[in-house]
Image: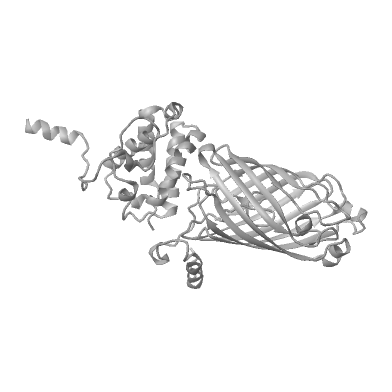
Amino acid sequence: MIRPLLLSAMTAALVLPATAPPAEARNRRSGGKLLLTNGVSTVEGSAGGGLATWAVVAGNETRDGIGGAGHATLVALPDFDLETAGAAIGVNDRVELSYARQSFDTRAAGAALGLGRGFTFRQHVIGAKLRVAGDAVFDQDRWLPQIAIGVQHRINDRGATVRAVGARASRGTDVYVAATKLLLARSLLLDGTLRWTKANQFGLLGFGGDRRAGHGVQAEGSAAYMLSRRLVVGAEYRSKPDNLGFAREQDAWDAFAALAVTRHLSVTAAYVDLGDIATVRDQRGAFLSIQGAF
Amino acid sequence: MILALALLLQAVPAEEPVDPYPVSNANAGTTPIRDPALWRAFHGREGVGRVVDGMVDRVQKDPRIADIFKGHDLVRLRRVLREHFCHVLGGGCDYTGRTMRDAHKDMGVQQADMGALIENLQASMRAEGVPFHAQNRFLAKLAPMRRDVVQR
């Protein structure tokens, strides 16, 4: 597959502290991960569940290769639509670089909010994740989960509007630590993630606000049960800051099913509850996502 | 009588000799799961035999890893795998093979190869009708052996 020398040198430098044998002794190769053990794509482009980012690295690659994933997701709510599309690259099952483009269509609610019908918030999310310890899948004789640290930088391109509703900034950076463990003997996958963030509604309504300006710690997590090699069902929870005085924000949760149609294609469907968004109450609806991975 | 012995040796597929090593159940790399329900889920010794044969047949046809098994003593491999699986699944067999580290020495197994092997084992267990959750209990015992199996 693709083996640019420069990239190989870069990845070798990145994994030096991690594994003993020199990179030259191993054949570079693509693929090799077991089905669904790379999770799916979150709405932020990183590998995880739908809402919660996990410690797993995107793509089907092992420590010996480069992999990637792409996704398109629609969250259809009673009064809003959130569409995201993005891609992630996984290097040596150690480093993940991700990008997602989100658009949040206010539809008729936009007129009621004084923004104009169909007013759409748009946001870029650029992420990097580093696996620092453990192997979620293979370390079945240890309690240590797979642990990763990561950053997500968000750029909202409706700066004037988000400031007008009380946000302090149109850009923000999240820092998170994720712990993911497959309890294979119980066919159960658990994730717990702590996120240091100031994002209002994932950043779609800007960052910080009149109630709280700065970062705070939020928690997210997933529990997933494998019904078969290809089919996983589970639930997720994600707490969110409540920075804006004009529109209170609640925590989000979902119940999902993810199906690996093939090694390279999976689909996720979920019932998701995002709470109230921009004063519009009870935004519960459908989460539909398609992911490709190599 | 020598003729009879020669005929007998021909009838039973012979294993190639290996260097002597200390034989111990500790070589299995893990302790047995003591749950009769799991042993039944694998359909006992006959079922385990079919799972092993199915896996060895599959890996030889899997272009991702077939080369690793070329030139290997598959007669011995089938026997020690049967012992190993039976031992780990609580079937009461003794494992007489080498340690995971020694058995895989110089085979050059990469992480992706072990993934492919697991997929072939899963296919073989499915063919035997082993329920998914019983498969996972067994795989959870084998997974940590990656540290000894994957050597590059």
- Residue at 75% x, 52% y is A240
Q: Is residue A195 above or below residue B48?
A: below
Q: How is the image coloured?
A: one colour
Question: Where residue B11 appears, x then y in whole percent?
Answer: 19, 33
Q: Which quadrant would residue B23 be assigned to in this image?
A: top left
* Relative depth, front residue between A83 and B96: B96
Question: Where residue A114 appears, x then y in whole percent?
Answer: 93, 58
Left or right? Give the position of A247 relative to B108: right
Q: Is residue B50 above or below residue A283?
A: above
Q: Which quadrant would residue B90 be assigned to in this image?
A: top left
> Total of numbered circles in the picture?
0
Q: Quadrant of the C terminus of chain A?
A: bottom right
Asked if residue A100 shows in the view, the reply is yes
Left or right? Give the position of A229 relative to B146: right
Question: Where residue B60 appears, x then y in whole percent?
Answer: 35, 46
Asked if residue A58 shows in the view, the reply is no
* Relative depth, front residue between A163 and A219: A219
Q: Tell which residue pokes out farthest to the left in this image.
A: B1
Question: Where residue A156 appears, x then y in whole percent?
Answer: 77, 64
Q: Tell which residue pokes out farthest to the bottom in this image.
A: A6
Left or right? Give the position of B98 relative to B11: right
